[in-house]
Amino acid sequence: MTAQLYDMAEGQAPDARENDQLARLNAQIARMREAQPYWAERLEGVLPLTSLADLAALPVLRKSDLVEMQSANAPLGGLNGNPVGNLRRLFVSPGPIFDPEGRGSDWWGSARALHAAGVRKGDVILNTFSYHLTPAAFIFEAGAEAIGCPVIPAGPGNTADQLVAIGQYRPRVYVGVPDFLKILLDKADEQGVDRTCLQVGMVTGAALPESLRAELAGRGVAVRQCYGTADLGIVAYETGAPGMVLNEGLIVEIVRPGTGEPVPDGEVGEIVVTRLDPDYPLLRFATGDMSAILTGAAQDGRSNRRIKGWMGRADQATKIKGMFVRPEQIAAIGRAIPGCLRLRLEVSRAGEQDRMHLLVEHEDSNVVAPLAEKLAEITRLKGSVEVVVPGSLPNDGKVIADTR
């Protein structure tokens, strides 16, 4: 087995992987139909699948449906296969969407991504994802524990204390959004803090332009990224070969946006994932994210299929500094401030950082401050606000315009 692989599953023969996935999938469908009323209704009459291609005949569950489902059937919309009292953690993500964490080693599947980035047993990890309500920090905590790495639970922001931790504990690995890594390096250099211990970056949750990757590499930090969601864990990760290799324990399809119809390899479409897990089983979960299957085998010993990486959103929701912002949240801002007409959130990048600017049609320019407060409260992110003349925004139905 190639030494760079995390385990034998990464290098198994594709036919063996597919046969294993098919057996696990049919066993999971049988459990779901027996114990979960929501899935029993959706899977009524479904016979055991004879190939993974048969998945295409099953209905798609959209991430955008979770808010309504969970509101009608608290806490998890009937999607959990294990009673809530048996789970490990319960999260609240923007939307709001409620996500569980089950018990067991590396439940989120982040260890393979960390290992592929160069993380090894004993490496100290600076984890800058939030430890408050959302799961990102815990996703990587689980992988670090599986590998055998101590973690500094730093969370986001508070750069002064982060630099103290870097100086004292000498972490080799940074985990977080790419923008904040640059901020930490800049602050360390400004203040004369030795940050040369940081050599590996595992980033996700925001765009990683090649210009920023090159800058970070030039400053001594080799950065790799992964793609995942709070519902699914880590879906795919960079290994040094082109694209991102798909994680074990997941079945990934690329479908035509707005449908459940698979597209040919190489064509851009929406990422749909089937999660083979008894705690929170998901069949054909449509993420709203876009990508494409890369053709041709990789030369790094890993045999699973690869995607090109995150290629935008199939809907108008977008991710800013690691947090999803959805059209429903922008609408809530408008409802909270009387007199608002159309609202449009423009998302861009400046100085290698995500920026958001809210345009609001309103008769009164004095509502800028309350709008900014409501924007921060609802999205958990800060952005600028501009009041514009009623009727001046495009009548195109677009609530979020992402120009990154």
Image (spheres, rainbow, N blue to C red):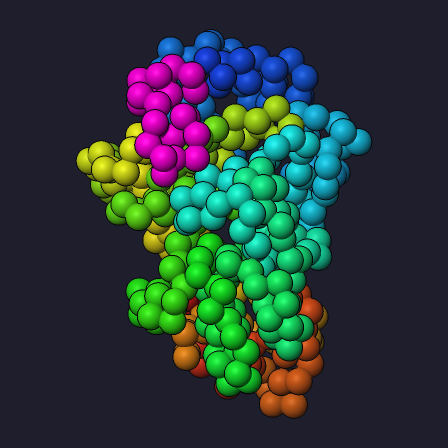
Residue depicted at 49% across the width and 35% down the height:
285
Residue depicted at 51% across the width and 40% down the height:
111
Could you say where residue 17 lies in the image, as x and y percent from the top left? 37, 21
Stretch of the chain drawn in magenta: 1-21
Name the foreground residue: 103 vs 260: 103
Residue depicted at 51% across the width and 11% down the height:
45
Residue 9 colored in magenta in the image: yes
Which picture quadrant has residue 254? top left
Q: Is residue 58 left or right of residue 148?
A: left
Residue depicted at 49% across the width and 45% down the height:
120
Look at the image and tell me in which quarter the C terminus lies.
Answer: bottom left
Could you say where residue 247 lies in the image, as x and y percent from the top left? 43, 35
Number of callouts in the render? 0
Q: Is residue 294 left or right of residue 375?
A: left
Could you say where residue 225 lies in the image, as x and y percent from the top left? 41, 53
> In this view, which residue lies farthest toward the right?
85
Name the foreground residue: 200 vs 224: 200
**Image height check: is 210 above or below 283?**
below
**Image height check: is 362 above or below 253?**
below
Which picture quadrant has residue 51? top left
